[in-house]
Image: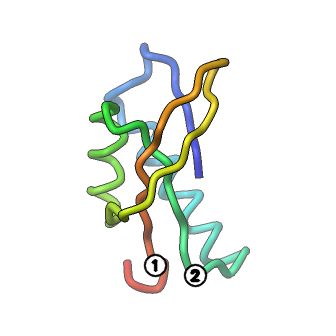
């Protein structure tokens, strides 16, 4: 799962609410067992969100292109049945 939010909306809980809704949909409708977040390590807000929602940092990384530039992202995992 990936997401992006404009700076004026940071820190207001909108992304937490959106990710919780997406997780509920992933589990109840899509019947997914696991969800992964790819997070740029310097993005403290997203790292905090992942930890608050029970995601665990894995040993994996992925390189993703965002706004025309490549970034190495950490991979966070959540087993849906365990939250």
Horizontally, is 80 left or right of 12 in the view?
Answer: right
Q: Percent from the top left, x then y, of residue 45?
A: 31, 35
Which element is circle 2 on?
loop
Horizontally, is 24 left or right of 76 in the view?
Answer: right
Q: Label 2: which residue? A: 33
Q: Quadrant of residue 40?
A: top left
Residue at 33%, 47% in the rendered image: 49
Q: Label 1: which residue? A: 79
Mark 1 and mark 2: Cα distance apart in space: 6 Å
Front position in the image: 42 or 48:
42
Q: Are marks 1 and 2 in contact (CB under 8 Å)?
A: yes
Front position in the image: 59 or 1:
59
Q: Percent from the top left, x then y, of residue 22?
A: 59, 58
Front position in the image: 2 or 18:
2
Residue at 27%, 35% in the rendered image: 44
Which disc, if any, is residue 54?
Answer: none
């Amino acid at each position: 799962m990936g997401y992006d939010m404009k700076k004026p909306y940071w820190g207001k809980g909108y992304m937490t609410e959106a990710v919780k809704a997406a997780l509920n949909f992933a589990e109840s409708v899509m019947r997914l067992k696991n969800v992964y977040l790819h997070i740029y390590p310097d993005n403290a807000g997203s790292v905090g969100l992942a930890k608050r929602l029970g995601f665990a940092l894995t040993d994996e990384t992925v390189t993703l292109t965002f706004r025309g530039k490549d970034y190495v992202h950490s991979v966070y995992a959540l087993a849906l049945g365990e939250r």
